[in-house]
Amino acid sequence: MTAWIACDWGTSNLRLWALDADGRVLAERTSDKGMGRLAPDGYEPALLDLATQFLPADVCPFTVPVPVIVCGMAGARQGWREAPYLPVPCVPSGAGAVRVATRDPRLEVHILPGLSQTDPADVMRGEETQIAGLLHGDPGFDGVLCLPGTHSKWVRAAGGRVLHFGTVMTGELFALLSEHSVLRHTVGGGEDPAAFDAAVTAALADPAGWMTRLFPLRAEALLGDLSPATAGARLSGGLIGAELAAMRATWQGQQVALIGADRLSDLYARALTGQGVPVTRHDARALTLAGLKAAHAALGKVAA
């Protein structure tokens, strides 16, 4: 029997888990109705599309609503309802969750807050739940977390708390350059590990000069035999190397926990281990669910 529902509501997709009272997953559902496709009044119908079978069949005066814990972009300003950010340093938990009014009395929805930082200004929404999942499973963690993606997050955590963090738009820059600049004629798929490694090393050695290495990718393709795979590896390696150079003070001398998709985490792990940095790998989906479970437990304690 479903005791509660966990949701990870991103920009592109919605992932839902139905869980029993012991936290066991009974079912998992996904849809493409992410924040980017919804107006505020579309969230409840999108949730019901996935959740109806896990809710009481009949509505009566004695119907007990099913708790739904939501993380991610549903809590953004342009989402279902804005869930304010918690300022760091803080424990990423269910504290500050926002209750959302619903038309369906079978739902009791809470949206988890993101995290914020004022100096330098920064925010995150969704990643904090993955961080909470890792810290819940490893309360003694003292180190750095890297969450590579469209907007990569670098997080310093200790004592169960997020101390500070930084965001680098590496994934978005790669997409813009490879799809919407002159380099779209040059960069392609495939792998070239040696080219990637060389580009990381060059960017780390001369981060100020990485921009001068962009247009030569196009020129070498026109004048020589630079392959799309090699061009892509050099662009990716250069951007990741520049990111590592920018965040050197965060990861240097630390162990780094990587949380993300396999292919992207592979690249970051390769770049970091090449610098002698010890790296552990963690599955983002599993940590999201672990963080939602921790938030559900925390909210239950608050209610009690």
Image: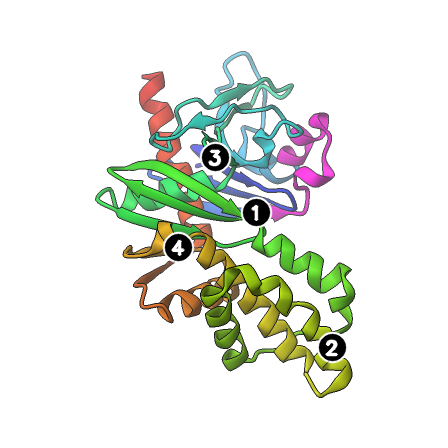
Please provide the residue range marked out in magenta.
Answer: 30-48
Number of the label disc, if any, that sits on residue 29: 1
Q: What residue type is labelled 3?
A: Pro
Q: Callout 2: helix, strand or loop? A: helix
Q: x, y (%) of residue 261? A: 50, 59
**Which numbered disc, 4 or 1, marks the residue that appears first in the sequence?**
1
Residue under numbered circle 2 = 219
Q: Nearer the viewer, mark 3 or mark 1?
A: 3
Cα separation between marks 3 and 2: 37 Å
Q: Give the overall secondary structure of the magenta segment.
A: helix
Give the image's coloring scheme: rainbow
Alpha-carbon neighbours of circle 2 within 10 Å: few (<14), some, or many (≥20)?
Answer: few
Residue 35 part of the magenta segment:
yes
Horizontal side of 136 relative to 168 (left or right) equals left
**Which numbered disc, 4 or 3, marks the residue that appears first in the sequence?**
3
**Which numbered disc, 3 or 2, marks the residue that appears first in the sequence?**
3
Q: x, y (%) of residue 164? A: 38, 38
**Front residue (pair 108, 70):** 70
